[in-house]
Image: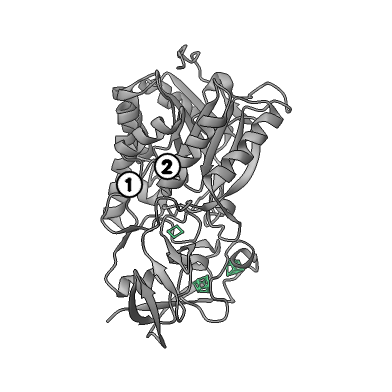
């Protein structure tokens, strides 16, 4: 029997933050269609899931065929009823639906000639759905929050960061994409990650806005972060192509990413499209720690995400760094991610050793993960703890380690190597 779900607010757990109203655009406010967006977004985990039987049926047209599907669900679930498959891993057959919160639009279909997220659109009587977008159809996704940054991201080379240069210095013009394939309970940017209310834009619109900001704040670096920017591949490739074609020569185009769907062929296409700098996270070595940090409970999926991120970094460092692409690695850090101090030391030692075997000079930024989103119970690592973890990684042999702390960024102990940029 096919299961359907409905979601309801548990008033006792609800903190009245209004996040599920101000950030989540419910596709069916009067009668839940089970998209899960509010369930995944609620910081207090106050939305509860119940199983229900389909209550109605509707007739729609899918790729020219008239079919009957359950009426109180999303287009994605209706298509699953018809035998279409969806996956949260990029290389699986079928449709890629990685965020399931309406932000990335990777699961887009045409609904009555409009691009809509299948995971976040209610099915309704008479809809005409095309499951494949045509080549000339502009991809869209939710990207915005354009702002100038003084420090940049983990893929910003240390000499270009604004550390110690005063409040008016900007390193980068950046924008942010909604939707993520991970479910990090400490998500440091959850306002953006779970947003399905902001307007979806074409890559050209987002790039134009970024180019204007770049000019206004007089920087040569432009960045996209998230959420997870890589989820909608056609969108991101067009975004970089548009930047490359319209930015002054010498501009640097930077992608901040969790790298979990960054396959080798995708990396090659991104470089071809214009990406010059990348900041992949390597969240862990062990599957257990990766699942603790990422919140991905399906261990097969988590394993593939973790392996893909390490393979992406290996591919970048062995084939493109530093001549074609600057690579800076992010390491999210909080002692609470580990079951004990011994486990933490052993895992960080292995993390650093693996990276050293690829390149001991690569820039690493250790990020002090604050209490955020669903982990209000943890403490932000102290400045001393960040100094210690930085020294530890340097002691293992990493030569360019930066630490983000509550008092600003700690510089690499040894000067960053001179890197010839292309
Ligand atoms: S997001 Fe969660 S805690 Fe906030 S108002 Fe909605 S149900 Fe309540
Ligand atoms: S956001 Fe989705 S899961 Fe939540 S009430 Fe609306 S339809 Fe139901
Ligand atoms: S998977 Fe549907 S919008 Fe991201």
Q: Quadrant of residue 264?
A: top left
The percent position of residue 100, horizontal first and vertical second, equals 44, 61
Q: Is residue 334 visible?
A: no
**The residue carrying mark 1 has its beta carbon less than 8 Å from ligand 3:** no
Residue 61, placed above or below residue 338: below
**Disc nearer the start of the sequence (2/1):** 2
Of residues 125 and 181, the one nearer the viewer is: 125
Which of the image's four quarters has the C terminus? top left
Instruction: Count every numbered label the image shows and give the total.
Output: 2
Depth check: give the residue in front, 208 or 192: 208
In screen coordinates, is 81 left or right of 120?
A: left
Q: Position of residue 103 (x, y in %)?
A: 51, 56
What number is the disc on residue 219? none
Residue marked by disc 2: 258
Q: Is residue 408 above or below residue 421?
A: below
Q: Residue at x 41, y 88 (%)?
A: 56
Q: Residue at x 42, y 37 (%)?
A: 281
The reply to whether callout 2 and callout 1 are in contact (CB within 8 Å) is yes
Does residue 149 lie above or below 80 as drawn?
A: above
Q: CA distance from mark 2 to mark 1?
A: 9 Å
- The residue labelled by disc 1 is 305
């Amino acid at each position: 029997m096919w299961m359907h779900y409905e979601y309801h607010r548990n008033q006792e757990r609800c903190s009245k933050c209004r996040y599920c109203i101000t950030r989540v655009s419910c596709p069916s406010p009067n009668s839940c269609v089970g998209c899960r967006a509010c369930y995944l977004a609620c910081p207090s985990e106050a939305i509860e899931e119940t199983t229900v039987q389909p209550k109605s049926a509707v007739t729609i047209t899918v790729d020219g065929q008239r079919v009957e599907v359950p009426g109180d669900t999303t287009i994605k679930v209706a298509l699953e009823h018809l035998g279409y498959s969806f996956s949260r891993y990029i290389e699986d057959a079928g449709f890629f639906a990685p965020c399931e919160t309406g932000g990335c639009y990777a699961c887009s279909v045409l609904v009555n000639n409009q691009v809509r997220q299948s995971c976040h659109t209610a099915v309704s009587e008479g809809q005409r759905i095309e499951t494949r977008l045509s080549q000339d159809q502009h991809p869209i996704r939710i990207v915005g929050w354009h702002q100038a940054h003084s420090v940049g991201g983990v893929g910003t080379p240390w000499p270009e960061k604004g550390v110690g240069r005063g409040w008016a210095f900007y390193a980068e013009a950046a924008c942010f994409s909604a939707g993520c394939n991970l479910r990090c309970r400490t998500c440091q940017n959850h306002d953006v990650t779970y947003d399905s209310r902001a307007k979806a834009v074409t890559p050209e619109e987002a790039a134009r806005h970024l180019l204007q900001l770049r000019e206004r704040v007089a920087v040569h670096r432009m960045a996209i972060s998230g959420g997870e920017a890589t989820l909608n591949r056609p969108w991101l490739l067009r975004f970089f192509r548009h930047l490359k074609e319209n930015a002054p020569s010498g501009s640097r185009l930077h992608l901040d990413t969790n790298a979990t769907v960054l396959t080798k062929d995708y990396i090659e296409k991104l470089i071809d499209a214009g990406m010059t700098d990348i900041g992949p996270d390597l969240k862990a070595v062990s599957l257990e720690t990766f699942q603790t940090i990422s919140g991905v409970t399906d261990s097969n999926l988590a394993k593939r995400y973790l392996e893909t991120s390490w393979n992406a970094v290996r591919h970048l460092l062995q084939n493109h760094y530093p001549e074609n692409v600057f690579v800076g690695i992010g390491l999210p850090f909080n002692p609470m991610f580990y079951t004990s101090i011994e486990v933490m030391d052993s895992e960080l030692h292995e993390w650093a050793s693996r990276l050293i075997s690829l390149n001991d000079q690569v820039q690493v930024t250790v990020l002090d993960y604050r209490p955020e989103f669903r982990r209000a119970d943890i403490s932000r690592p102290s400045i001393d703890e960040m100094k210690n973890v930085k020294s530890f990684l340097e002691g293992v042999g990493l030569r360019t380690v930066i630490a983000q702390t509550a008092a600003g960024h700690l510089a690499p102990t040894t000067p960053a190597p001179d890197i010839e940029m292309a």
